[in-house]
Amino acid sequence: MKRRKPQTEPHLRVYSNRSVLVLADGSEFVFEEGKQSEQARARYEQIVKQLQSGWLEQLYGNLLSASEQFELDDESVHLLNRITDAVTSEVGRAVVGLTVLQLCIKCLSPEQDIRLHKAGAKSFSWREGVSMRRLDTQFITPFLRKYDLLRINKDGLFMTRSLAENYPYTPFYKASIRGAKEAWLTLIDLVEAGRTDSLSALKYLLARLKNRAAAFKQLAEQAIRITEQFLEVYPAYETVQATLLKHIQSSAYPARLLEVGMHSFLQVLEGTGKLSGYLSPLCQMRTANKKHRNVADIEILDDAGNIVEAWDCKYGKTYLYDELHELGEKLEDKQVELVGFVVDTQPDLREEVQSLMREISEATEADVQILSLPDWIELLLQRYELEQERDSIARSWMRAYIECLCQRRREKAPIDEPADQWVRDWIALLEVELRG
């Protein structure tokens, strides 16, 4: 039950039969103790039924196809990153597992308050709570162990006794917890307030865990080894470029791989010291985050943070007349030297498109281009006077590309979609190529 009072200092009041959470705006949440209510029991049974039906495993299996659906604001992403980054061999795993559990509960029963982790008829219980211990033991811990997402005790998360105190999970939960406690409790507050979408948060969290798993690390090592073997046999630019393009076009979610391919190429150019500025990190694939982009998917900035060069990736679309109009609007108050679109095949440059490109160039003084990936590479090699180094640039590009997918370049390429299938596709492709 929620009541609203005037502005106050947030706090938790604990009584003999209830706890009352008071927020800064005066809102009160009353958590009554006692035998689980019939409504809470019905919510619990609904959650169990859906988990028994394989809901979580199906969600996990579809992560890659859902990679553009991480509709999360930057604060939520920052908190989820802190929660996963705090995991070591010694600490942080229980907090991550509990976050997975709570997000599952919220997805399957939005009415359930995920701050209430105990329910029953004999021992301590909240009337509107559910038994998170039982849900974890039956479903969450077995799932996390099955897919090697988190190395936790088979008896479950609540073997960590600090998670089982008789207080609701709020910022005032005083038990000593090893891991990203503050980030976890803040995230749960945002979920309960409706400011963080529980399904997007769960997908994002599972994707990060998948990319951190031991199995993925072994896969990454294999991919890097076979890349070096391939480059010993095929060191020339033409073969490297053709192989990279083949991987982009044949794998799941090629639009994202085109971005990774272009960004990794620019990472190599940046390493030569000849780039016209510094390369902004690869944009994470979250629709809400896309809005912060000034001009394009990939941007090069000067020391003052102004965009010098910008490129938008357009996979599977060659006629970009409408996109050019949008680009012209974005450039109205900016001084960009070089800007344009890169497509995976030959672009459709009919006269009306070329005419609009000229108009935008005359109005903004920007060099506007629409290019295929190979032509884009040629343009940049000429722009930065690297034509004579194309073979070594290509080899470095291939290494950078697979290192990005293998989570080895997160500072420049924070790829948070699950990348394991892309890496498997890469290994399979190179094995075929090496067999000749």
Image (cartoon, rainbow, N blue to C red):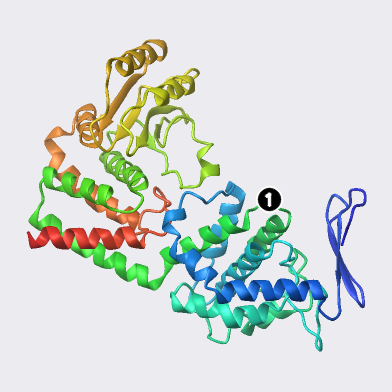
| Residue 410 shows up from this direction | yes
- Which of 18/227 is in front? 18
Taking 12 as reference, is 429 left or right? Answer: left
Q: Position of residue 15 (x, y in %)?
A: 92, 73
> Relative to 131, does residue 221 appear above or below in the rendering?
above
| Residue 87 shows up from this direction | no
On-image quarter of the N terminus? bottom right
Taking 62 as reference, is 244 left or right? Answer: left
Q: Position of residue 13 (x, y in %)?
A: 89, 67
> Relative to 181, does residue 269 appear above or below in the rendering?
above
Q: Position of residue 12 (x, y in %)?
A: 85, 65
Q: Position of residue 369 (x, y in %)?
A: 30, 24
Quarter of the rendering containing residue 65 = bottom left
- Element type at mark 1: loop
Give the residue type at disc 1.
Arg
On-image quarter of the C terminus? bottom left
Picture residue at 33% right of the left edge, 34% below the top? 317
> Relative to 41, does residue 203 appear above or below in the rendering?
above
Picture residue at 48% right of the left edge, 79% below the top? 145
Picture residue at 77% right of the left edge, 71% below the top? 168
Taking 377 as reference, is 143 left or right? Answer: right
Q: Residues within 10 Å of mark 1 (few under 14, many from 20)?
A: few
- Which of 89/256 is in front? 256
Quarter of the rendering containing residue 188 = bottom right
Taking 417 as reference, is 90 left or right? Answer: right
Q: Which residue is mark 1?
A: 195
Residue farthest along the bottom direction in this orientation? 122
Looking at the rendered structure, the number of numbered marks drawn on it comes to 1
Quarter of the rendering containing residue 147 = bottom left
